[in-house]
Image: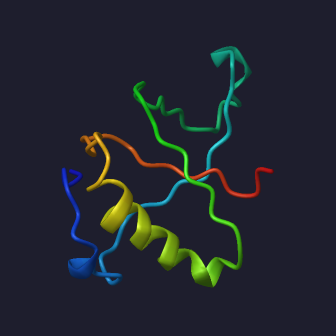
Amino acid sequence: MYETSLNFKDFNYDIKFIKWSSIEFLNSNEVPKDYKTYILKGGLYTVFIHKGQAGGFSKTFEFIFSDWIPNSNYERDNREHFDLIGIK
């Protein structure tokens, strides 16, 4: 379950989570038999682009949860968060 709000100061980097690698298939008939399928829930997502080294991502993460979300008209809901890595 996802928290509806996150205080970055209380964030614990030692909390374990599951990270999946995935591929988008437009047609379910194209999915290889040995793959597991998962359908992301629809909804409005906000896109943030981190520029720089991976080691600096914590500053981007802190900005999103400590500054941008609290000062926006949006709030987190109980669904997946995902990353697009290596997309230009």
Name, please, the residue furthest toward the right: 88
Residue at (25%, 41%) from the top-left corner?
A: 77
Residue at (20%, 56%) from the top-left corner?
A: 5
Residue at (69%, 67%) from the top-left corner?
A: 51
Quick check: 45 above or below 82? above
- Residue 15, given in percent of the width and then of the height, sits at 30, 76
Quick check: 8 above or below 38? below
- Residue 11, given in percent of the width and then of the height, sits at 27, 77
Q: On the image, which quarter does residue 6 sit in?
A: bottom left
What is the tally of numbered marks visible in this picture? 0
Name, please, the residue furthest toward the front: 71
Q: Residue 26 or 55: which is nearer the viewer?
A: 55
In the displayed structure, does residue 78 sit left or right of residue 51?
Answer: left
Residue at (42%, 68%) from the top-left corner?
A: 63
Q: On the image, which quarter does residue 28 sit in?
A: top right
Q: On the image, which quarter does residue 33 sit in?
A: top right
- Residue 36, given in percent of the width and then of the height, sits at 55, 37
